[in-house]
């Protein structure tokens, strides 16, 4: 494992980072520092923008001065595993343009290398081609979710994508297999949800009247004796929204370790289920006329 010490430094925001979130800027700049650590130093106020504390969601302005505290970056990469993941990511590219990529993200691969021990999808993409060295995630999907993920190769298109997301001009459609017979009449779930930390230290999202409003539209595609294939359209983009909504209504997603039926999942795993059956089926940036879909994995049909 290589360790590198970085002293206190400052960064003057240039036009290429205008409108970019503070957390995304630091993730780009502080390579080798775990994402969790980046959020920690922001929350503790160790990162300052114009001498003031800021939230991770703060949108940077040209000539903002970011104070970055001293930190030690570490990275240990299994070369064989890294090459396998690299090949997997290359094969999963659905669309390749001069200023962006759309990838069918494989399951089990995090968007970011979270612990400094392994590479995430964005770090792998930066290694694929010299032209991709400044690649940035436009949005994220969970490690155990497959499907459409957009990667910006230029700061200009990143700003365009983020503008569309802020203005709610993006349609994100997911497919999932859930336990039980999903009623055709259940077409929308609206729920206030909040991030919680349990006594065990485990972080989850739960229904909470003091939480943030979240809404998902659902459509039943097909159902069998025990499971249903559904399509979900995100109206608000909250953490684990679809997983929490379906579980709250009594229809947990198969293979969902965090919000699913633990006993039932073990039964399915003993019979060969190796993933959570949630897939980002399509994404549509309506004003940019950029739309892409990723076919629903064949394994989904096995359970419906």
Image: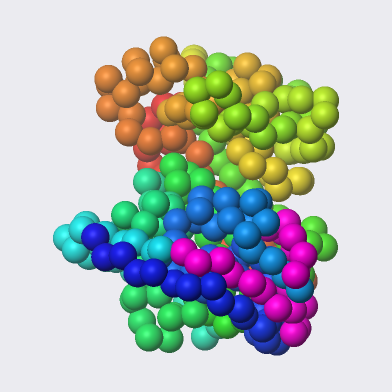
Magenta stretch containing residue 24, yes or no?
no
Relative image position of residue 140 (x, y in whole percent)? 56, 55
Q: Is residue 64 above or below residue 114?
A: below
**Residue under the image location 34 percent in, 76 percent down:** 128
The residue lying toward the viewer, choosing from 277 and 111, is 111
Relative image position of residue 28 (x, y in whole percent)? 52, 71
The residue lying toward the viewer, choosing from 33 and 196, is 33
The quarter of the rendered structure image containing the N terminus is: bottom left
Magenta stretch containing residue 55, yes or no?
yes
**Residue under the image location 44 percent in, 35 percent down:** 276
Relative image position of residue 111 (x, y in whole percent)? 47, 56
Q: Is residue 14 above or below residue 121?
A: below
Q: Looking at the rendering, which quadrant does residue 285 occupy? A: bottom right
Relative image position of residue 105 (x, y in whole percent)? 44, 56
Give the magenta part as a residue range. Answer: 51-71
**Residue under the image location 38 percent in, 30 percent down:** 302
Left or right of 208 on screen, residue 137: left
Left or right of 243 on screen, residue 245: right
- The dominant secondary structure in magenta is loop
Determine if residue 96 is in view.
yes
């Amino acid at each position: 494992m290589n360790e590198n010490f970085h002293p206190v430094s400052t960064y003057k925001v240039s036009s290429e980072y205008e409108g970019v979130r503070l957390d995304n800027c630091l993730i780009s700049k502080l390579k080798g520092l775990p994402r969790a650590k980046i959020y920690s130093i922001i929350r503790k106020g160790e990162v300052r923008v114009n001498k003031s504390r800021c939230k991770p969601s703060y949108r940077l302005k040209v000539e903002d001065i970011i104070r970055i505290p001293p930190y030690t970056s570490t990275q240990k990469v299994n070369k064989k595993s890294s090459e396998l993941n690299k090949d997997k990511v290359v094969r999963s590219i659905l669309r390749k343009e001069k200023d962006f990529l759309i990838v069918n993200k494989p399951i089990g691969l995090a968007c970011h290398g979270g612990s400094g021990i392994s590479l995430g999808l964005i770090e792998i993409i930066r290694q694929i081609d010299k032209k991709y060295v400044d690649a940035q995630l436009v949005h994220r999907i969970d490690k155990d979710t497959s499907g459409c993920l957009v990667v910006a190769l230029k700061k200009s298109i990143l700003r365009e994508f983020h503008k569309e997301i802020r203005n709610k001009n993006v349609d994100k459609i997911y497919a999932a297999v859930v336990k039980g017979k999903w009623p055709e009449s259940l077409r929308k779930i609206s729920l206030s949800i909040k991030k919680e930390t349990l006594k065990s230290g485990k972080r989850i999202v739960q229904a909470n009247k003091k939480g943030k409003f979240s809404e998902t539209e659902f459509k039943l595609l097909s159902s069998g004796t025990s499971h249903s294939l559904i399509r979900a359209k995100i109206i608000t983009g909250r953490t684990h929204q679809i997983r929490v909504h379906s579980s709250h209504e009594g229809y947990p997603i198969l293979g969902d370790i965090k919000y699913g039926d633990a006993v039932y999942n073990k039964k399915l795993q003993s019979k060969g289920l190796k993933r959570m059956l949630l897939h980002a089926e399509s994404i549509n940036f309506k004003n940019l006329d950029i739309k892409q879909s990723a076919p629903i994995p064949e394994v989904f049909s096995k359970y419906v």
